Amino acid sequence: MNSDEMQNNPAFQNLSPEKLQLLMNFMGQEKSNSAKDMMALLMTFSGKAKDQGIQFSVSETDFIAEHLMESMPPAQRQRARMILNMMRRKR
């Protein structure tokens, strides 16, 4: 994802500079082809955001997850979505 795509997405219209920088750094990382690796990346990202006092909305988190799943084969994408849905139910 490039910065133009992010700026045109309604979920990212009013981000603070710190939040935008953290997100751009994360989005620049190499994507994974497995749901397990994607979850590890999300957990690392979540920890960094928490350490900086940054929280992401549900729509922002969904957009990030979809970005990470772009290069996954369909079976892994389905597995990743299932894991994300299970995590949401636990909240």
Image (cartoon, rainbow, N blue to C red):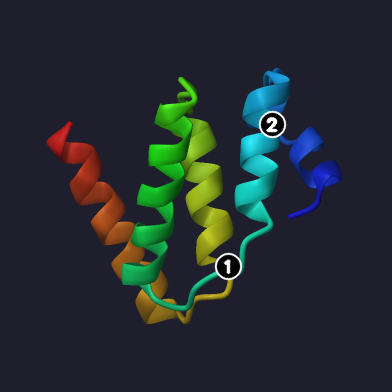
- Which labelled disc corresponds to residue 81? none
Q: Earlier in the sequence, mark 2 or mark 1?
A: 2
Residue depth check, mark 2 versus mark 1: number of the one nearer the observer = 2
Q: Is residue 64 above or below residue 14?
A: below
The quadrant of the image that shows the C terminus is: top left
**Distance of label 2 from label 1 (alpha carbons):** 21 Å
Q: Which residue corresponds to mark 2? A: 20
Side of 78 where 3 appears, left or right: right
Label 1 residue SS: loop
Label 2 residue SS: helix
Q: Position of residue 64 (x, y in %)?
A: 54, 47
Q: Position of residue 84 (x, y in %)?
A: 30, 51
Q: Position of residue 14 (x, y in %)?
A: 70, 18
Q: Quadrant of residue 88?
A: top left
The quadrant of the image that shows the N terminus is: bottom right
Side of 65 where 78 appears, left or right: left
Q: Amino acid at mark 1?
A: Glu
Q: What residue is rendered at 26% in x and 59% in y?
A: 82
Q: What residue is rendered at 49% in x and 25% in y?
A: 52
Q: Is residue 37 above or below residue 26?
A: below
Number of dots carrying numbers: 2
Residue in front for this viewpoint, 7 or 53? 53
Side of 71 where 21 appears, left or right: right
Q: Amino acid at mark 2?
A: Leu
Q: What residue is rendered at 80% in x and 36% in y?
A: 8
Q: What residue is rendered at 19% in x and 49% in y?
A: 86
Q: Quadrant of residue 89?
A: top left
Q: How would you rate the neighbour count of disc 1 (Cα within 10 Å): few for under 14, some for 14-19, many for 20 or more?
A: few
Q: Quadrant of residue 83?
A: bottom left
Q: Which residue corresponds to mark 1? A: 70
Side of 43 where 4 appears, left or right: right
